[in-house]
Image: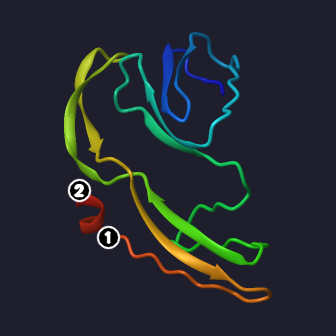
Amino acid sequence: MSSSDPTLHTVHMEGAASFNLPFPFPDRASVRVLTQSGLIDIRCNAGHEWMNAEMMVVEHPYYAVTDESSKFELSDIPPGTYQLVAWHEGWSTGSKSAYDVPTEHQVQRPVFKAPKTSEKTVNVLPNQVSVVTFSLSANSLNAK
């Protein structure tokens, strides 16, 4: 990873990986090897509370990101029964006041609920197409 921003950022990761990674200089790469699969919550610990991301680390090639129409496709799946998991990063629930380090002002930043998952079992047959449909809505994502 690297940052092109001349402002100090400190990437804090929690979950499948846990560490702080400072970026004190622009365009200088920092490398960390992620050895455990799972979800990683990423935040900036340098006062930029609105800077956040989620990263999923997997040990296999069977994952996808949905396209603009919320569809995805996995191919070359060996026959068998699998647990398919749909994951959503969260849903905006409002905003909160945060201190913006570069401008030295209080600003409103979005607040997101925790990620949500939905699981379905799928049986993959040889030379067949399997279709699985997930339905996620704002109400289902806001439910605790």
- Residue sitting at the far front: 81
| Image position, residue 18 (x, y; %) | 52, 25
Residue at the location (74% across, 57% down)? Answer: 61
- Residue at the spot of label 2: 144
Q: Amino acid at mark 2?
A: Lys
Residue at the location (78% across, 86% down)? Answer: 126
Q: Indicate which disc, 2 or 1, sits on the residue closer to the N terminus.
A: 1
Q: Amino acid at mark 1?
A: Ser
Position of the C terminus by quadrant: bottom left
The picture quadrant where one finds residue 137 is bottom left
Residue 54 versus residue 5: which sits nearer the camera?
54
**From the viewer's perspective, is 114 left or right of 66?**
left
SS under mark 2: loop
Please state the total of marks drawn on the protein image.
2
Q: Badge 1: few (under 14), some or many (20 or more) residues near its Cα, within 10 Å?
A: few
The numbered mark at residue 137 is 1
Residue at the location (43% across, 35% down)? Answer: 52
| Image position, residue 91 (x, y; %) | 31, 54
Residue 17 versus residue 81: which sits nearer the camera?
81
